[in-house]
Structure formats: structure tokens, C-alpha cells
Image (cartoon, helix red, strand yellow):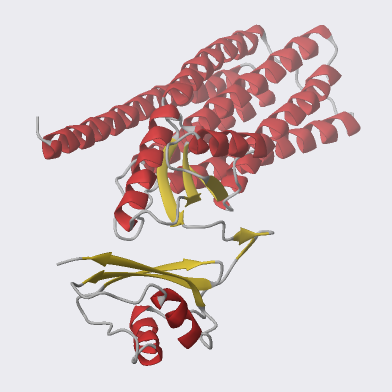
């Protein structure tokens, strides 16, 4: 199989995998939405019939879950699109943004529940006692929402989707609110109506904690928070095991949805060619992706020396480029050596100086101390480092 066939197959497999993930995400969300609509209708109808205002409120909560499910389907579909000109790194951040929204929604729901419950505790107004059908519907809601939570959480973990996981926890908040309703109804029917409000405050705190954790983790991703230091050090040591790598510095990371994007400076032997250094970088990238499946992209910079000094990159921007270097040397050495165009000249930018290698093809004999002579003639050139002459007879 040719290389382009292998690349095409890999791309096809990746697209197929993304399509499967999207289908699983949409399927589990659609199932949850249907259940939310059914539960919402049952809760409101039986809440009215059984005189349970708590069950009616819980029914409205279920309908809000259904609306959230629609949002999740839309965001999931968009976030799995392939990279394009406007989004070269992909669209996974839309999923992250959706997770922040859901986390904030959980906090808002928790705040509303807590406020309502505290107000009910403070106001000792009498309420109409609900009947047993409301208790049954609350129990059915608890069971149904717990099952859909487990199913959604399993799928979200499998496809590594924080948005689906967030939606799973949103489903559990409905189950928890149904528990509050169940306790409240049972307490009211038993003469302990205060149990409803007290339990609701506890559950509201739990819901707010889940919402905060989801939102905070996603907010850290949106502001390009790095992976933990211990993971960074593990990656650094792993890269150093690659043949040809002398050192690793300035290793930076950021999240893109469930994946990680790395930027790294790789120090190699300064005398190797550009193509060899690039090949070493490609090997590093390949090893990282094979060892760590969540690393999606690696951008490497090949360094001939450690240019990271106390967190600041050493600058060589003031050093001249090839044309200026050769012109300056040609003027300084006009009486000693003729730098013809066919001379192979290598420049090495090291330690804020330029080391020069000159490959000369000639049948003529050159003075044995020509290097020392050239160095003396170029003594005023402050950027000139080592000088090496290589002779090859024609």
C-alpha cells in the first residue's frame, strides 16, 4: 500500500470515528430529551390533579432539561466539524463553551431552588396536602432520570465529551430535585412539611458544586491553562528519550476539547543539517501521539543550543544573515582568499556569534596557517566565531 493510500485510510478512519462519536452523542441526548418531555407532561398533569406545586415546578424543570438537550445536540454537531480556514485547530472549543453554559445553568437552577426553599422555610404559610399519585410520579422520575444519567455519563466518558458528561450531571440534578419533591410530598403527607424545604437546600448545594466544577474546568480550558506540572515533566522526560534530542525546553500545552496541543523547543546537535533536525522533530511528534492518545498536535522548534535563559529566549536577531556575512568576509579577506560563488559556506549561529565553515575545491596549495591569517584580518568583526576551512581537490 502506498503512503498516500495509508494517509487517506487514516483520514477516513478518523472521519468515521468522529461521525460515530457524533451519532452516539446525538442518540443519547435524543433519548434523554424524549424522557424529559414525557416526565414533564406527567409531572405537570399529576401535580395539578394531586395538588402538588412542588411536582409542577419539577415538571417545568424537566421541560428546561429538554430545551437544554436541544442545545447540546446543536453544539455537539458543530463541535465535531473538521478544521476549516476560520478554525484551523477545529471546533472543539464550542463544546467547551457549551459546557460552561450548562455549568452556569446548574448553578442558576441550584440558586433558584435554594432561594425558594429558604423562603418556604421562613414563611410558615399552610399549603394544600398532596395526594399519593404525586408521590408515585416523583418516584418514577427519580428512577428514570438516574438511569438516563448513568447511560449519558457512560457515553460521554466513552467519546471523551465534556459536554455530554455535563448534560449527564444535568440529568442527575433533575433526579435529585425529584428526590426533594418525593421527600417533600412524603413529609407533607406525614405532617412534616418543613422536610421539603430543608432537603431542597442540601440538594441545591450539591447541584451548585457540580455546576461550579464543570464551569471552572472549561473556563480554564478557554483561557489556555496548561496541563499539570507533573504531566508536563513526564512529557519532557519522554521526549528526551528520543535519539538525537539533547535537551527539551519551553514545553507549552493547552487543551482543545478532550485533546491536548503542545508547543516545544527541541535542542539537537548544532552541526547536523536542517533536514535531519526536522526529521528528529517528526519522530518526536510520532512517538508522542502513539504514547499519548489525547495529544492531537505537536508544534516543534529545532534549536542548535539552549536559547531559554531564565525563562527568556536569548536573542540573536541582531546578527546578520548570509548575504551580509559573505559580503563582509569577502571584503576582509580580499587579499588572502577568493570567496567564489561555488564555495560551500555553512553558517552556525551559536552563543550570539556566527561560526563559519568554508568548503574549498582547489588543486592549489594554501598556506598552512591561512586560518590564523583570516582570523587576524577579520578581528574587527565582533560577530565572527569559530572559523574552519575544508579542502577538497578537484
Left or right placement of residue 212 versus residue 43 in this view: right
Report x, y in % for residue 265.
Answer: 50, 52
Q: Quadrant of residue 325?
A: bottom left
Q: Write the residue at 49% across / 51% down.
A: 267
Q: Is residue 59 visible?
A: no
Q: Residue at x 51, y 47 (%)?
A: 97
Rendered location of residue 98, percent (x, y): 50, 44
Who's the residue at 20% across and 72% down the image? 362
Q: Nearer the viewer, residue 112 or 315?
A: 315
Q: Nearer the viewer, residue 319 or 312?
A: 319
- Decide if residue 220 is on the left or right side of residue 393: right
Q: Nearer the viewer, residue 378 or 191?
A: 378
Query: Where on the picture, by quarter, is residue 171?
Result: top right
Is 16 displayed left or right of 178 in the figure? left
Question: Residue at horizontal 45%, vertical 33%?
Answer: 294
| Residue 392 visible, this angle | yes
Camera-nearest residue between 371 and 222: 371
163 versus 178 height, above or below: below
**How many numbered marks are there?**
0
Q: Is residue 276 left or right of residue 181?
A: left
Q: Quadrant of the C terminus?
A: bottom left
Tell me the quarter of the image containing the N terminus. Answer: top left
**Relative image position of residue 149 (x, y in whole percent):** 53, 19
Q: Is residue 299 above or below residue 232?
A: below
Image coordinates of residue 45 in percent, x first then y, are 53, 22
Amino acid at each position: 500500500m502506498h503512503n498516500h493510500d495509508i494517509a487517506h485510510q487514516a483520514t477516513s478512519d478518523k472521519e468515521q470515528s468522529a461521525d460515530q462519536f457524533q451519532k452516539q452523542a446525538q442518540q443519547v441526548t435524543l433519548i434523554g430529551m424524549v424522557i424529559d418531555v414525557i416526565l414533564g407532561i406527567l409531572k405537570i398533569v399529576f401535580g395539578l390533579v394531586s395538588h402538588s406545586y412542588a411536582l409542577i415546578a419539577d415538571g417545568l424543570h424537566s421541560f428546561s432539561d429538554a430545551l437544554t438537550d436541544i442545545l447540546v445536540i446543536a453544539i455537539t454537531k458543530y463541535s465535531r466539524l473538521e478544521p476549516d480556514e476560520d478554525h484551523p485547530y477545529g471546533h472543539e472549543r464550542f463544546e467547551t463553551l457549551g459546557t460552561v453554559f450548562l455549568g452556569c445553568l446548574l448553578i442558576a437552577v441550584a440558586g433558584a431552588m435554594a432561594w425558594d426553599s429558604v423562603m418556604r422555610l421562613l414563611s410558615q404559610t399552610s399549603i394544600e396536602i398532596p395526594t399519593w399519585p404525586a408521590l408515585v410520579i416523583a418516584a418514577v422520575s427519580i428512577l428514570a432520570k438516574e438511569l438516563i444519567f448513568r447511560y449519558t455519563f457512560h457515553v460521554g466518558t466513552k467519546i471523551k465529551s465534556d459536554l455530554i458528561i455535563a448534560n449527564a450531571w444535568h440529568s442527575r440534578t433533575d433526579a435529585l430535585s425529584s428526590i426533594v419533591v418525593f421527600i417533600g410530598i412524603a413529609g407533607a403527607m406525614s405532617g412534616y412539611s418543613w422536610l421539603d424545604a430543608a432537603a431542597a437546600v442540601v440538594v441545591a448545594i450539591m447541584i451548585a458544586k457540580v455546576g461550579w466544577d464543570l464551569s471552572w474546568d472549561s473556563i480554564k480550558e478557554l483561557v489556555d491553562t496548561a496541563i499539570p506540572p507533573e504531566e508536563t515533566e513526564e512529557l519532557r522526560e519522554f521526549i528526551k528519550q528520543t535519539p538525537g534530542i539533547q535537551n527539551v525546553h519551553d514545553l507549552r500545552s493547552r487543551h482543545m476539547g478532550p485533546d491536548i496541543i503542545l508547543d516545544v523547543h527541541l535542542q539537537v546537535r548544532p552541526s547536523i543539517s536542517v533536514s535531519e533536525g526536522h526529521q528528529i522533530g517528526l519522530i518526536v511528534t510520532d512517538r508522542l501521539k502513539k504514547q499519548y492518545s489525547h495529544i492531537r498536535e505537536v508544534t516543534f522548534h529545532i534549536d542548535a543550543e539552549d536559547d531559554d535563559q531564565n525563562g527568556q529566549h536569548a536573542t540573536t536577531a541582531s546578527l546578520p544573515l548570509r548575504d551580509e556575512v559573505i559580503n563582509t568576509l569577502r571584503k576582509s579577506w580580499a587579499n588572502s582568499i577568493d570567496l567564489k560563488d561555488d564555495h560551500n559556506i555553512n553558517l552556525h549561529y551559536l552563543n550570539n556569534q556566527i561560526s563559519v565553515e568554508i568548503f574549498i575545491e582547489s588543486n592549489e596549495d594554501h598556506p598552512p596557517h591561512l586560518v590564523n591569517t583570516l582570523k587576524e584580518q577579520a578581528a574587527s568583526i565582533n560577530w565572527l566565531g569559530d572559523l574552519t576551512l575544508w579542502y577538497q581537490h578537484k
